[in-house]
Image (spheres, rainbow, N blue to C red):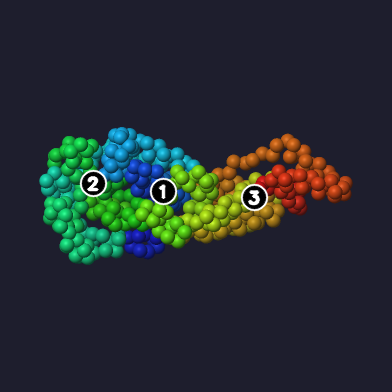
Amino acid sequence: MIKIYDTMTRSLREFVPIEEGKVRMYVCGPTVYNYIHVGNARSTVAFDTVRRYFEYRGFEVNYISNFTDVDDKIIHRAKEEGITPKEVADKYIAAFREDVSALGVKPATQHPRVIDFMEAIIDFVRTLVDKGYAYESEGDVYFRVEKSHNYAKLANKTLADLELGASGRTDEETARKENPVDFALWKAAKPGEISWDSPWGAGRPGWHIECSVMSTEILGDTIDIHGGGADLEFPHHTNEIAQSEAKTGQTFANYWMHNGFVNIDDVKMSKSLGNFITVHDALKTIDGQVLRFFFATQHYRKPINFTEKAVHDAATNLKYLKNTYEQPFTGQAESAQLQAFLDKFTAAMDEDFNAANGITVVFELAKWINSGNYTAEVKGALAELLEVFGIVFVEEVLDADIERLIEERQAARANRDFATADRIRDELAAQGIKLLDTKDGVRWTRD
């Protein structure tokens, strides 16, 4: 029985899907104006791991993650680079795909782009205006927050507190609003900006409306899980709930999941502090599978401290698992003991996808394997567990010369020619091959 920590109720809840055996899941994707940073990667890997675990448990997952390709930041970047907003979006979507592929992230079932849903967005906004939940002001369209039931409950805020905090605003946009906390559904175009025709004049969508439209258009009015970074609880996810439920009259998402932040050497990542790290740059010095392992094996809700030591430890631990996996699985093992490990793994991951506890079980399994329990069944089980974390090993094959040396050493040991055996062991060690003599024969690891 899978349990999920639901941000809306702030409680651990049993997962009950809308449709048995299937999961409808929407995860907010990047605004594609730059290379993604390690915080984006943490979220992408975390929810990819959640998806993989659902699939491990037999669910069919319809996993949607969008690209925001219409945004102020994209327009600004287009001006900087002297290209069109669409060219900016295309460039960084390609970069995103390359970066997350290096991290072993599976492509979403669909990666919708805002630009392809403009007609649906305009219809969505028109419906809210017709129902009295939204109003036009000088070409902009705003959502009436005061009409939303339990607004900002997701972020544990109250409308009264938000209104008090916004009461002193005097900027130009606030002057166009009925209430300072109302948010934009449609924004009037400024001269020279990309725009679309609408009943309220030329303009483009506000940020929040985009995900509501893509989610409901693809997955339906109510979905099982909506996910994203903790920074999206307010205002983005809060506003998605308000506008979606105002339009449909239905619960927008049954479970809300949010991943924790990434700190760099115990300090929150920030461009202003100069500790902003893109995945594009990180992959120049860190193997993608190591970076994936670092992100995927920690509990998704907890903050991660990105340090050189933490990444080094991840590389060391991953190497141990790789060496375990590459052994000749030709011995014997008790199936009942293997099943006990699998049951323990499931119990750990069923508790809100606790990857930290889940990977601990994998290491316990690896230790048991290396004590002499090598069978094809065991190897298959290990591979399945590793795949939950997005780790797939391509087995290295020893070349003929190294295999010959191992055989010669074994023959020397059988003839009690220990001097020759030791010499060959040292020769192999110089090539990065370490030998392990076990009751089931010689095993090897590669440095």
Which sits in the foreground, 287 or 408?
Answer: 287
The 10 Å Cα crowd at callout 3, few under 14, some 14 to 19, many 20 or more, is: many
The x, y position of residue 322, in whole percent, is 61, 48
State if disc 2 and disc 1 touch (CB < 8 Å): no
Q: CA distance from mark 1 to mark 3?
A: 32 Å
Amino acid carrying label 1: it is His
SS for callout 3: helix
Q: Which residue does the image show at 73% across and 51% down from the upper left? A: 436
SS for callout 1: loop
Query: Disc 3 marks which residue?
Result: 324
Query: Disc 2 marks which residue?
Result: 206
Q: Which residue does the image show at 46% across and 45% down from the upper left? A: 281
Ranked by sequence position, the earlier of labels 1 and 2 is: 1
Query: Disc 1 marks which residue?
Result: 37
- Above or below for 44 versus 117: below
The 10 Å Cα crowd at callout 2, few under 14, some 14 to 19, many 20 or more, is: many
